[in-house]
Amino acid sequence: MHSILCVFLLFITSINGQGLFDIKDLDWSTRPTDNFFMFVNGRWINRTTIPSSETAWGGLYTMKYENTYKLKRILDDLVRH
């Protein structure tokens, strides 16, 4: 189990040192050898609500919304000036 966890922890760290996944999402009450999917995603699944307008949700979707919002602000500023 320790080797699986070590490989997993290496995977979740990107080149710039910023995590690709949030460690807070790990469900430590689930053993990774029993249900790895729930170990990795359990807490995120339990606390996340997918908006009714969406079929899926996660980091890429929130990034899309944040970028759309930022671009709209930039374009609105350009129009005003």
Image: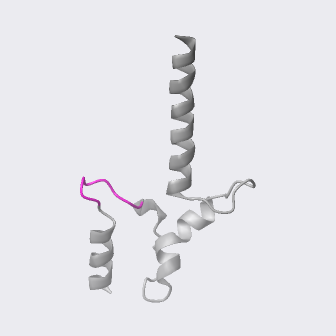
- Between 62 and 75, the residue placed more toward the observer is 75
- The boundaries of the magenta stretch are 14-21
Q: Position of residue 24 (x, y in %)?
A: 45, 60
For the question of whether residue 27 can be seen, the reply is no
The residue under the point 57% across, 17% down is 79
For residue 22, above or below residue 26: above
Q: Which sits in the foreground, 62 or 49?
A: 62
- Residue at 51% of width from left, 70% of height from top? 41
Image: 22 above or below 5: above
Residue 20 lies in the magenta stretch: yes
Lateral position of residue 4 relative to residue 43, left or right: left
Closer to us: 39 or 52: 52
**Magenta stretch: includes residue 44:** no
Mark yes or no: residue 3 visible. yes
Name the image quarter holding the N terminus.
bottom left
Q: Is residue 10 above or below residue 64?
A: below
Indicate the quadrant where residue 47 lies.
bottom right
Q: Position of residue 39 (x, y in %)?
A: 48, 76
Classify residue 9 as left or right of residue 42: left
Q: Position of residue 62 (x, y in %)?
A: 55, 49
Q: Is residue 12 left or right of residue 57?
A: left
Identify which residue is drawn at 53% across, 77% down: 38
55 in relation to 8, above or below? above
> Which secondary structure dominates the residues rendered in magenta?
loop
Residue drawn at x 37%, y 60% is 20
